[in-house]
Structure formats: C-alpha cells, structure tokens
Amino acid sequence: MASEVKDSQPEAPGSTGPLRAALGRALLYVARAWAGVPSGPLGWFSTRTVFPLTSGTVYQTMGEALDLQPDDELLDVGCGSGAFLAQQASHVRRVAGIDLSNIQIDLAHRNLRDRIAAGTADIVKGDASVLPWPDGSFTAATCMSAFEVFPDPAKVLAEVFRVLRPGGRAVLTIGERVPPDTQTDRRWGALWVWAEDDARHMVEQAGFTDVTIRYAQSWGNDPVSKSLIKMWERFGVDMREGRIVSAVKQ
C-alpha cells in the first residue's frame, strides 16, 4: 500500500522551518524561470546554452529505453525545446510535444520546423493534465524532469494513459533515487519526492501494467550539471540518478 503523502518542510541546521520553506519556494521559482516558465531572459539563456550540456545523457538513456521504431507515434510531455524529439525520434512516423513555456515552444517549432511543415510533428502550448489529443493517439509517450513540479501528477498519468493506444508504452522520469526510508511528500508545498513503491503504485493506479523501475544518470558530467546537483543537495534532494519508470497500456 502506498504510504501517506504529506507536505514537509525539513529544517536546515541554524534555520527555521518557515525560512527553509521560503527558500525552497524561491529556489523552485528560479528553477521554473530557468525552464522558461514564466518566460523571460533567464529562460532564453538556459534553454539555448545550458540545457544542451545537461540533458544529453538523459536523452540518450530515454531513447534507448523507448526503443523507438519507424512506425511509432511519440508524445513528449513537457517537451521543452523539442531537442529530444529531434535527436532521438527523427526516424519515427509522427511526433508531438506539449509544454507550458512560450520560450520552449518557440524553440521546439524552430527545431522541428521541417517535420511540422511535412505534417509529421505537432507542437502545442498547454497543460499536461489536459492533453489536447484524442484517445489512443500514440504508440509511445515520455516525460522527463517534469513530474516533480506537476500540481497533480496522477492526473497527468491518467491523461498519458488515455492518449496511448492499447499496447502503447510509456517511459517516464519520476523523481530521483532516494534513501530507502524516504516518505513520499511534497517539499515546501512545491516539489514532489516519491518513495520507489509509491512511484510504482501511482503508475499502476493510472491503469498501466508491466511497471519496471531503474535508475540512471540524470545529468551530464559538465561543471554546470555538477553545480546544479550540489545546489539541490543543500535542499535535501539528490539529483544524481533519475528514476526511470517504464510501463505498458494493456
């Protein structure tokens, strides 16, 4: 049975709980701005210069896990600049992506302009919990580095399940590796952290079967990635290894 989900505000040495929570929320705001939500100069800088350094490792890992075939139709939830679709899914029949960031959507349209013109790519701005595609639209789906900040991750999973065809597969990053005694919570009221059993249960509750979990390096080996890992460690989050969840819609 899944453990109780709760909000927690772990205290740092020499700081109060409320101060810790305020710092955590401020950090999350900066992280969202880093990803271009809301749009702004920080998002333009990071998506053009930093993300190509930090994301290459996880893109390759996720591409291998999906094992995409020429007849696949792939949805990337939280697609960002469309780099994963351009790099790992150039050979599939059709790709689609959705993201909240104007900056990321603009870059995705540029990165996939030829496929969009050919009618084999669809990039939209929107909410991951209300996907704008009909039931059974895709054979595969992925989502990277976004579940932690979704207000309602279970609703997003239900939508991913809905738009997959029977037999469709999903490969998702859902949080990071955590110590065995970790309890699922929403730190600072903003960032989800899941125990492994709870992550599995959440995916199964959405209707998926054949759920498997493994861990792989989430970030690159560049100085920027290492600095970001150390920054999150100060807030009790280990970002070194991502939890990769694979599942099937029977």
Image (spheres, helix red, strand yellow):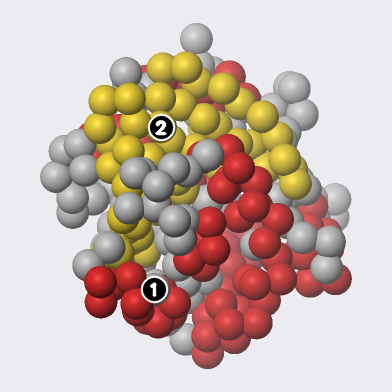
The structure residue drawn at horizontal position 67% and vertical position 76%, both measured from the top left corner, is 50
| Residue at the left extreme, as displayed | 134
Disc 1 versus disc 2: distance between alpha carbons? Answer: 23 Å
Name the element at disc 1.
loop
Camera-side residue of 198 and 209: 209
Answer whether residue 42 is visible to the viewer in this image. no
What is the x, y in percent for residue 103? 42, 80
Going from N to C along the chain, the mark reached first, 1 or 2, is 1
What is the x, y in percent for residue 152? 36, 42
The structure residue drawn at horizontal position 30% and vertical position 64%, both measured from the top left corner, is 121
Label 1 neighbourhood size at 10 Å, few (<14), some (14-19), many (20+)? many
| Residue at the top extreme, as displayed | 1
Name the element at disc 2.
strand
- Relative to 203, say whether 34 is above or below: below
Residue identified by numbered label 1: 112
**Residue 94 position by quadrant:** bottom left
Residue identified by numbered label 2: 169
Is residue 126 left or right of 50 when viewed as pictured? left
Camera-side residue of 155 and 6: 155
Camera-side residue of 247 and 31: 247
The structure residue drawn at horizontal position 47% and vertical position 17%, both measured from the top left corner, is 210
What is the x, y in percent for residue 150? 42, 49
Dot 1 amino acid type: Leu
The structure residue drawn at horizontal position 40% and vertical position 25%, both measured from the top left corner, is 248
Dot 2 amino acid type: Arg
Does the residue at mark 1 contact the one at mark 2 (Cβ under 8 Å)?
no
What is the x, y in percent for residue 222? 83, 68
| Residue at the bottom extreme, as displayed | 41
Label 2 neighbourhood size at 10 Å, few (<14), some (14-19), many (20+)? many
